[in-house]
Amino acid sequence: MSLTTCNVHFSQQSDKIIYLSRPLYRQLNLTDNRSIHLKLGNEVITAAVKQLKRAGNHLYLSAGVRNSIKVPKSGNVYLLSTGENELQLGPLVGILTDTIHPAESYPFGSRSGFIKQVIRTGDRKAYMFGFTPSDINWQQETVNGYFLNTQGNWYRKIVPLPDVVYNRLPNRKAEISPYISSVRERFVKKQIPIFNWSFLNKADVYKLLDNDPEALAHLPESVSNPTPAKMKEMLDQHQFIYYKPGGGSLGIGIYRLTYNPKRGYFVRYRKGSQNVLARYSTFQSMMKMLQARHGSRLSQYVAQQGIRLIEIDKCQLDFRFHMHKNGSNQWIAAGIGAKKAGRGSVTTHVKSGGSLMTPEQALSRTFGTEAGAVLEKAKRVAVKLSEAIERNYSHRLGELGLDIGIDKSGSVWMFEANAKPGRSIFKHPSLRSEGKASISYIFDHCLYLSRFKGGTNL
């Protein structure tokens, strides 16, 4: 098996014939071949092969060939020789998403810009496109994908089912529908790798890691749908806990509950645009307020042990570790953002008054000369936690957002794991290069999953 890059050209001939420049012909060891099998996605055609006197790696496809296997465009792309007289163009990478109100210039709504970035990262290397579940024709095994032209405009092209699918469906509601579940299962049945299977529920993550000793050392005590008695027990033991919705995001609906033996119970939460601090003389009165605000939805809540995190200006810090699988199938921290809570806020989210810093800035102010060592330790723990989630999860993962805390002794804790992390940390001017690297890792992992990896430049 060998991998190279080539420049694909379209000719107008109707015959099923492929022309290869001499250097490419020799590189692929096709000395005695009069015909080859050419593959794109799940489509294969057998065509006659001839040499051309031309320098460089060039591949000319007749109309008969390119229409038969639905090659979407000319230009540079990887060419994989699998042996056994077969060549494969690609990889053909599909980014699965959805939108409610598509527009010509924004076919995927607010996610269009991000999907453009991913596609551009694979430019001159792969065939990358965006698509929605409704764009799939399972009978013909094709996808009506959204491609980018050289001017950055979208156009549609029907292509075979992809070699790999990057799942960026935008919300939990879309993912739990029976139709979306069947779409994912059909890719699996056709042995097409799909990664980032679904959003992770907070309670699910804790259950996944419940029997993993390596991970448990870094997890605060977390209880799904706790009884009032259990919550009181946790408050007595830990002095404060976080009470949060299992499927929530952006810090919405989170409470910090604190017990002071002399002064009673305190609740911090976000109400509209305000941070609220309320005091209750009894545990029962505090619970009555929570019941009044959420009712039966409290059955979806999780109670989590509070950790005394490092602080700047008496505002606590936590960290978002944006983790990726790379081209060697290993977990790495592509980007790390430090989030400082706003004054009186229960979370570090920017919408609640929080601010974003680089980890170096944050840790140098809290650990001084030990900052570098603490950060490296946190990176190692983040990799171990990602590996633990992956080995206990029944589907393929390629990206994780870990919400990490560091306490005043330097111990590392994980509060949440997200399979489809947001990218807000990369808006920080000092983290933009990490944002570009993050997208490169997505592409590299697609190469790995599709067996296209390595390669040489033209």
Image (tube, rainbow, N blue to C red):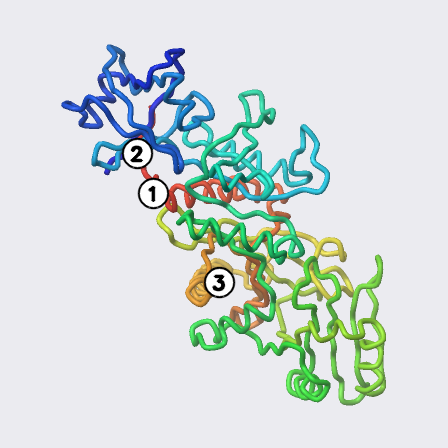
Vertical side of 356 occupied by 3: above or below: above
Callouts 1 and 2 close, C-beta under 8 Å: yes
Q: Is residue 132 visible?
A: yes
Disc 3 secondary structure class? helix
Q: Give the residue displayed 25% in from the left and 37% down from the top.
A: 82
Q: Give the residue displayed 83% in from the left and 87% down from the top.
A: 282
User: CA gap, disc 1 to disc 3?
Assistant: 31 Å
Q: Quadrant of residue 409?
A: bottom right
Disc 2 secondary structure class? strand
Vertical side of 280 occupied by 95: above or below: above
Residue at the spot of label 1: 451
Q: Residue 399 in the image: x percent, y percent?
A: 50, 52
User: CA gap, disc 3 to disc 2?
Assistant: 38 Å
Q: Callout 1: few (<14), some (14-19), or many (20+) C-alpha neighbours within 10 Å?
A: some
Of the numbered discs 3 and 2, the one sitting upstream in the chain is: 2
Q: Callout 3: few (<14), some (14-19), or many (20+) C-alpha neighbours within 10 Å?
A: many
Give the number of the mark in front: 1 or 3.
Answer: 1
Of the numbered discs 1 and 3, the one sitting upstream in the chain is: 3
Q: Give the residue displayed 71% in from the left and 66% down from the top.
A: 314
Vertical side of 435 occupied by 184: above or below: below
Residue at the spot of label 3: 378
Give the number of the mark in front: 3 or 2.
Answer: 2
Callout 2, which amino acid? Leu
